[in-house]
Image (cartoon, rainbow, N blue to C red):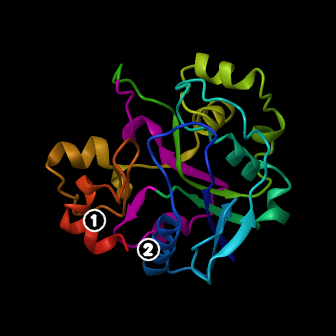
Amino acid sequence: MLDVVCFKYKSKRAYHSTFGPQAVNALSHMVSRHLRLPHRFSCITDDATGLDEDICVIPIWNDYADVRNPSLPMGPSCYRRLKLFSAEARTLIGERILCLDLDMVITADITPLIDVPDDLVMADGITLEKDARTLKPYCRYNGSMMLLTAGAHTHVWDSFDPLTSPRISNAAGQKGTDQGWISHCMGPGVRTWKRADGIYSYRNHVATHRGVCPRDARVVLFCGRTNPWSPEAQALGWVRARYH
């Protein structure tokens, strides 16, 4: 059984995106339509209000909840997700885990991307996202999509020090929170999903082309200020047709 999970929790700091239960429900339905593998959909959350009845609820843990984002002091902090790399994740969630961000639109079958034997696959940070200020790659790997086998890379979790690790990964040029530390720990060589696999960035590949969705797109990641439920995105027919 594949465990598909997402995270929804109240941030302790102001952030431009607020995720409600509708975002979880929409993601669950998109996964059901576009993943032809037996799976269980769960939300790791501090508030299950409004979630569809068929969504499993996993109480969120507080490990590293207060660790700040070293790249953007007022940006999101996702260090809690590092626990997916712990040996305990097998008991908390399951053996095989697909972690998805809420701010994405799944546009076509993702089964070929997920039905692979690798113990870790992530969205490619080099081709999908650029630092808005420097136009350099933001991070080696993007945490919006992660497929992993629980316990395969426990050093990512075991070696994390909340006092020093964020500074170390940020200084090494790996921006963000959990994705920065994962990129620093794993180094090059992890299998990634790229544009050739149908994974696109809305900000970098769609908005810059008048909102047209690429014909071969399987997933469009909304990294940045625009979300699938934002007026800008909802003005696009392909978003309205698929994000529900």
Q: Residue at x 60, y 24 (%)?
A: 70
Mark 2 or 1, nearer chain start: 2
Rendered position, 113 above or below 200:
below
Q: Are marks 2 and 1 in contact (CB under 8 Å)?
A: no
Is residue 125 one of those drawn in magenta? yes
Q: Secondary structure at mark 2?
A: helix
Judging depth in this view, the residue of 77 and 213 nearest the camera is 77
Q: Position of residue 229 (x, y in %)?
A: 35, 60
Using residue 97 as the reference point, say whether residue 64 is left or right of it.
right
Q: Position of residue 244 (x, y in %)?
A: 38, 74
Q: Position of residue 163 (x, y in %)?
A: 78, 22
Q: Which residues are magenta?
A: 103-132
Q: Residues within 10 Å of mark 2 (few under 14, many from 20)?
A: many
Judging depth in this view, the residue of 44 and 3 nearest the camera is 44
Quarter of the rendering containing residue 16:
top left
Q: Position of residue 191 (x, y in %)?
A: 54, 48
Q: Amino acid at mark 1?
A: Val
Which residue matches tag 2? Answer: 30
Q: Secondary structure at mark 1?
A: helix
Which residue matches tag 1? Answer: 239
| Residue with the most extreme top position | 171
Distance of label 2 from label 1 (alpha carbons): 12 Å
Q: Residue at x 50, y 56 (%)?
A: 19
